[in-house]
Image (cartoon, helix red, strand yellow):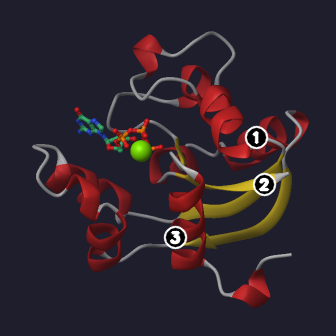
Amino acid sequence: TNRTFTMIKPDAVEDGHIGAILEKITASGFRIVALKLTQMTVADAQEFYAVHSERPFYGELVEFMSRGPIVAAVLEKENAVEDFRTLIGATNPAEAAEGTIRKMFAKSVGENAVHGSDSDENAAIESAFHFSGREMF
Ligand code: GTP
Ligand code: MG
């Protein structure tokens, strides 16, 4: 068993998809071990996405991710990181497989509804960015 970190991004929160996305996640065998509605400041988003700071879309990404509330969560399941990335689908919803969360809810390669950590190491770093030890169960 291990853990991954996810965010329901501002686009999906604005569109009222929190419940449907959490239902899909739990129905797929993930246990929620931390959960909150929160908002990243511009500085938070710059730090969270620092790895992308040289990419041409960095400014747009930071603006998007800080524009409204998100749902942050830590999820537990065997093979969590890889299985969650399979569940959310390709970064670009036009390329996402049928039945994936991004296929169902994402609008574009930028506004793509959900985040999923890309490694166990980053899952731990990203979880600690948003949650204290007392908030993870
Ligand atoms: P995350 O789970 O959110 O990390 O997505 P990912 O791992 O599938 O993609 P990646 O880490 O490469 O990019 C991080 C995020 O940057 C994406 O989820 C998008 O929100 C945004 N992004 C990536 N490529 C583009 C792009 O070409 N244009 C824009 N506007 N945003 C992009
Ligand atoms: Mg990524």
> Could you tell me residue 3's position as x and y percent?
73, 56
Q: Amino acid at mark 3?
A: Ile
Foreground of the two, 30 or 106: 30
Residue ID at (83%, 59%):
32
Q: Earlier in the sequence, mark 1 or mark 3?
A: 1
Q: Amino acid at mark 2?
A: Asn
- Taking the image as shown, residue 34 lies to the left or right of residue 52, namely right
Q: Is the CB atom of the residue marked by disc 2 within 8 angstroms of ligand 1's nearest atom?
A: no
Q: Secondary structure at mark 1?
A: loop
Query: Label 3 belongs to which residue?
Result: 125
> Could you tell me residue 60's position as x and y percent?
19, 50
- Measured Cα–Cα span from mark 2 to mark 3: 14 Å
Q: Amino acid at mark 1?
A: Asn
- Measured Cα–Cα span from mark 1 to mark 2: 6 Å
Quadrant for ligand 1 reads top left
Residue ID at (56%, 20%):
103
Could you tell me which quadrant the C terminus lies in?
A: bottom right
Q: Secondary structure at mark 2?
A: strand
> Could you tell me residue 4's position as x and y percent?
67, 54
Query: Label 1 belongs to which residue?
Result: 79
Q: Earlier in the sequence, mark 2 or mark 3?
A: 2
